[in-house]
Image (cartoon, rainbow, N blue to C red):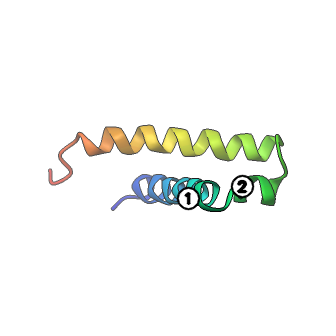
């Protein structure tokens, strides 16, 4: 697995855990760590979103070639 796949997978896992915490406990871990509406919080959300799009693209490709 190349480095891009690992990075996007880790970021999507972080996003999934954060959404799980929001749904279960109304607790936003990203905002708790980096403060609400900070540049770093927005950057994390942007990176998670881009990672999801990259993973969606990878899902449609044949990785065995």
Residue 20's disc is: 1
Rendered image quadrant of residue 56: top left
Return the residue nearer the eye: 22 or 18.
22
Rendered image quadrant of residue 30: bottom right
Q: Position of residue 3 (x, y in %)?
A: 44, 58
Q: Position of residue 21 (x, y in %)?
A: 62, 61
Residue 51 appears left or right of 45: left
* Residue under the point 82% across and 40% down: 37
What residue is disc 2 on?
30
* Residue under the point 49% across and 44% down: 51
- Label 1: which secondary element: helix
Residue 64 appears left or right of 40: left
* In contact (CB < 8 Å): disc 2 and disc 1: no
Residue 61 appears left or right of 24: left
Of label 2 and label 1, which has the lower sequence position?
Answer: 1
Q: Position of residue 47 (x, y in %)?
A: 59, 43
- Label 2: which secondary element: helix
Q: In the orientation shown, which residue stands out farthest toward the left?
A: 65
- Image vertical order of residue 44 relative to residue 13, above or below: above
């Amino acid at each position: 697995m190349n480095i891009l796949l690992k990075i996007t997978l880790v970021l999507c896992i972080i996003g999934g855990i954060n959404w799980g915490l929001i749904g279960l406990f109304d607790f936003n871990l990203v905002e708790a760590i980096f403060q609400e509406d900070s540049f770093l919080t927005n950057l994390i959300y942007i990176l998670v979103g881009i990672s999801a799009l990259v993973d969606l693209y990878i899902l449609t490709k044949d990785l065995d070639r």
